[in-house]
Image: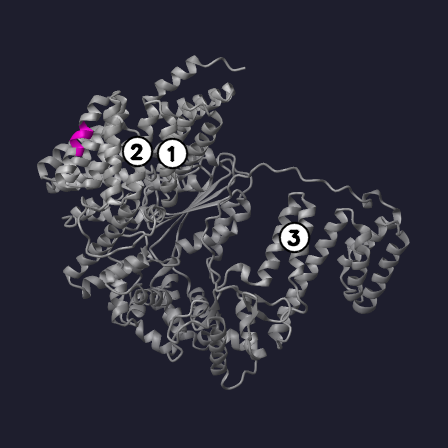
Amino acid sequence: MHGLRFAVLGPVRAWRHDTELDLGTPQQRAVLAVLLLRRGRTATAEELVDALWGEEPPVRAMTALRTYASRLRAVLEPERAARQKATLMVSEAGGYALRLPRAALDLSVFEDGLSAAEEARRAGDLDQAADALHSALEVWDGEPLCGIHGDWAEAQRVHLEEQRLTALETRYAIDLERGRAAKSVADLTELTIAHPLRERLRGLLMLALYRCGRQAEALAVYADTRRVLVDELGIDPGPELTELHAKVLAGDASLAEKQPVRPVEPARPLPVPAQLPADVADFTGRAAIVGELTGVLAEADRTAMPVVTVAGIGGIGKTTLAVHVGHAVRPQYPDGQLFAELRGAGPDPAGPEAVLGAFLRALGTPDKDVPAGLEERSALLRSRLADRRMLVLLDDARDADQVRPLLPGSPGCAVIVTSRSRLAGVPAARTVDLDGLVTDEAITLFGRIAGEQRVEDEREIAAEVAAACGHLPLAVRIVGSRLASRRSWSMATIAERLTDERRRLDEMRVGNHTVSATFELGYGQLYDEQARAFRLLALPDMHDVPLHAAAAVLGLPVTATEDLLESLVDASLLETPAPGRYRYHDLLRLFARRQAEKYDSEVARADAPHRMLDFYFASARNAYLTAESGDGERLSTPETRGTEFATAGEALAWLGGETANLCAVIAEATRGDAPDLAIAADLLLSLEPLIMSGTHLWEFEQTARLVVTAALEKNDARSRGRAGYMLGLILHAAFRLDESEASLRSTVELAEASGDGHIWAEALNGVGVVTFEHRRYEDAFAFFQRAADAFADLGSTECEADCLSNVARAAAELHRDKEALDTAERSLELFRALGSAVGAAKAMQFLGAILDGMGRPEEAIPHYLDCLAVFRSTGLRLREHHTLYRLAESHLRAGRPVEAVAHAEEALAIAREIGQRFGEGRALEVLGRALTADGRPDDGRTCWEQALAVFQALDAPAADDVRALLDRAPAPR
């Protein structure tokens, strides 16, 4: 945030890095102070005026406020252009908000220190608690909000000073627990003089004196306290101080100084996910329902898990209610809260398998340990949640079949489910059919958004607005926000705009009203480019819409697109779950699509999903070319440039982060007439670098099968062959070798029949890889050679070089050493001639393996070190793993087991990090050999046992090799 930091615990000040900023007049500083204490929440213009001037603001208060805001923006964002959108001090809903990281404000640093101290104290670490409190109190710099005047500032000062005194009391209480009574007496004496009416400070001073052997002085403190309280307030000391006095008088043993208990190092805690969305600050009404649901969910003595279902039409407030109730019962579920959007209202509901995978990862399950099947994932979730108290919120469920696999089995857990329909197949302890707000509640909510006084002055018209909104919370919120942002409109103006029933969404009805007019009200205020963006971006079936993808669909520059989308966010027509990403509420998406049917031609409506698909294809193609350093000859040419990447690591990170949307756009392209199926097949083909890393294999397999099925229905042999090739690679990465070989052999036939030369050659190479894994080296050699010849005929030198490396591997396994070495060196020459650093590194790795296999490890190691440097610099973690494994083998063969152990351990760590199960088994196997050679046979045996378990789970032939090692190994000592 441009190095900014702010202070309110003293004079109101601001710095950029180490330079203090000139914040102007006290009134201008007061505006900043209000916004800082709002912690990112919007302060309306009325609230700011009230804070600055109280009940008697000047006539031109609003003008002065805007002047102060403009000057503050100039100080805080000096590099912002005149018409550029503010990113720090933003305008929204008729007011202002400061968007700051938490650590930028001294008050937040103070509060975080208090929290850390409390956590350390609960854990028994008194020293750490005292240090945290000391650090927290050090951020204070005198009287809070010093120099700011008025009733608001004085009220805030009282509140902040109370926090400081409470922290001081806690600090000295901890010091007494730590046996530091003598060091505390002087400070406590000074504090009680400054704050003579605070009984807790007096009690701490009495206890400190008593523990220093000064019983008489402790009793004198009590007598003085009683006198002051009687004289000043006419009351006696409270029961706690009175009880302490009695104990001091009696010399009670319980007051003796306790020896501090040193904390025991705690075991590493299980993750405690806290996934509930934020509770809305202006939650209104529903008191009876909230009370009933919290009672069900907070019931202590229960033998079965409570499941609460909330049903109702979209926009009725199901999610808001569920999240509010979830926060209300959080203390009853200390082990965490899980949340999932099930997207049941859309055409692409979330699969239970994907949701279970996300839940298991949130609970600390490594990606490699997440099972592939639905039943296995569901069973593992129930096991993870057994004997834990955890709340699960499942939002927007489609049906009971989607929900049942996601339910825990422990009575200590609880579940809240929202859905548009009643879920008859879910065993619910309580089902709520949610209706609209009652009139008073709707008016209250409307007032909180549009301005309470404004609404109260015209309450009858406000009731008409609430009725026109169907008492639907979402509609009330949108109308209220629109009114709040248009000060020239009257209540009558907005009420009149809501009377036209023809503008209301037919599908969402409550009595004689629908929510359509609410959306029309917002949509009707948009200028043409805003409206077009709102309509077109709703057409592709996306989980969310990244900024650059939106720009591609709209055909606009990124900056102009961001301005459009942010204006739609301001109008409450889009949400922004993360910077640069946007999404629709399900009802707004439906509304936007209906508007597109009215205003956009069939060609324009078809073009939006096409542009989205083309953007993702272009970006994935760029990622493929960056990660593989290839020329992309096998891929068609997209219409747009897409996102570009500087390194392979960056490309792979983008592919991994966009997996959900990549699968979504491919799936959408397989529906209906599927005119873009060929692009979808090429997009799938571009995902090869990510698939080879072994992540998201289940999701990619389902997506590839959708393309295969659609291509079969369209009699599109080219797309079917390409998707079949990728399916073979996916199955190979999952080590389902027989299925992989079948898919790849089918692809060879399809690609040959359709004349898809590149895929025909790739599939031949793929069959060679699978047969090589099966140790059918003669077959593998033949397929590799055919593939290399095919690529040579196509003029694809890089692919030819890749295949030649494979030919060399197979020749080496067939003990045709000279042929293997010559072929490997030919591959390296081709890559170097092309200037492909990554390709040359791959060839060097194969050359090193062949040299090592020929008994020449000292010649192999330099090749490995050279290619290792390339793979590390480009972020190719899988290839880095392969190289480290090979280095371990060569060092072991050269008689250097210590070096072999180091490289094998690093290879093992990478394999586990990226979820490469076969690589994990291979690293364990060579690590076992290295440990055994280093004189640690028991450790070696342990590694082999783990490797055997991995290979057996994969049904890999390497399991036989490990069994042989275990058979020859000495018995454990």
Distance of mark 3 from mark 2, alpha carbons?
49 Å
Distance of mark 1 from mark 2, alpha carbons?
29 Å
Give the camera-side residue of 360 and 560.
560
Pointer 3 or 1: first along the chain: 3
Question: Could you tell me which quadrant the C terminus lies in?
Answer: top right
- The residue beneath circle 3 is 132
Is residue 259 shown above or below 376? below
Q: Which residues are magenta?
A: 783-788
The local secondary structure at tag 3 comes to: helix
- Asked if the stretch drawn in magenta spans residue 786, the answer is yes
Residue 733: which numbered mark, if any? 2
Distance of mark 3 from mark 1, alpha carbons?
52 Å
790 on left or right of 547? left
Give the camera-side residue of 827 and 253.
827
Residue 862: which numbered mark, if any? 1
Please, which residue is most extreme toward the right here?
216
Is residue 880 shown above or below 48? above
The local secondary structure at tag 1 comes to: helix
291 on left or right of 600? right
Q: What residue type is disc 1 on?
A: Pro
- One can see residue 902 in this view: yes
Q: Residues within 10 Å of mark 2 (few under 14, many from 20)?
A: many
| Residue 176 image point, x, y percent | 77, 49
| Residue 102 image point, x, y percent | 53, 59
